[in-house]
Amino acid sequence: MAALACFSLVLVAAGFALAQTGSTPVAEQPASQGTSTDLFVMFGSDVVRPSLAPKANYNIGLGHTMKFLKKNPLGDELTFGYTYENAGSHGFLHTQFGSHTEALGLMKNFALPGTKRVSGYTWVQGGVTSMTGNPRVENRFYDGESLGAIVHFNDRNSIWIQETFNKIVTVPWYTTAMFGYTRSW
């Protein structure tokens, strides 16, 4: 519910900011013209069960839209990302307990009816999570499945808002609500 409230607040704020600047809707994104490369930086919070304690989640990565994948129903953008998650007792501060995930992904961008300023995406990722803070580093398979929205400010700058269902082998599933900035070229 908090993620939905955050999502709504960001969309309203973005719409208000765009209305104040008088900018016109983006007619066509670079990805629809062929290929584009995206650099994304996202911040968020895990809601880890069973205690529902908030935990920091920071993500940085690159994505590249492939023209030949445009008609692929599973995805049109290949991604690589690195994520740091704090698993310690301080929700947003670094502790010795954490997980470091490197993941490859396939993202599917899609238009939303009635708007050119906001689009949607699905994102499936798989990779390796290294859990630190124990006597030895424990490596586990990671699976992440996301649904999100992109608020386009212009052809090159956008804000992403997403909710991710995370599963690490030997760890109960959990969700992550994130928002971030993306620069495309």
Image (tube, grey):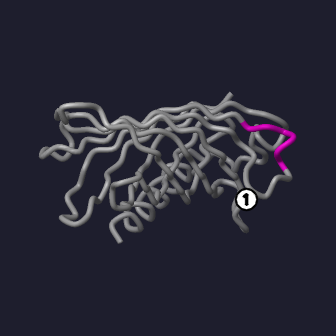
**What are the residue bounds of the magenta stretch?**
65-70
The quadrant of the picture occupied by the N terminus is bottom left
Residue 129 in the image: state x and y as whole percent.
Answer: 40, 39
Label 1: which residue? 111
**Is residue 66 inside the magenta stretch?**
yes
- Can you say whether 28 is above or below 176 in the image? above
Give the amino acid at mark 1. Answer: Ala
From the viewer's perspective, is 51 left or right of 161?
Answer: left
Q: Residue furthest top?
A: 185
Of residues 112 and 148, which is closer to you in this image?
Answer: 148
Q: Residue furthest left?
A: 89
Residue located 17% across and 35% down the image:
95
The quadrant of the picture occupied by the C terminus is top right
Residue located 38% across and 37% down the image:
139
Of residues 65 and 26, which is closer to you in this image?
Answer: 65
Of residues 143 and 107, which is closer to you in this image?
Answer: 143
Residue 73 in the image: state x and y as whole percent.
Answer: 79, 58
Residue located 49% across and 53% down the image:
161
Name the secondary structure under disc 1.
strand
Residue 13 in the image: state x and y as whole percent.
Answer: 44, 55
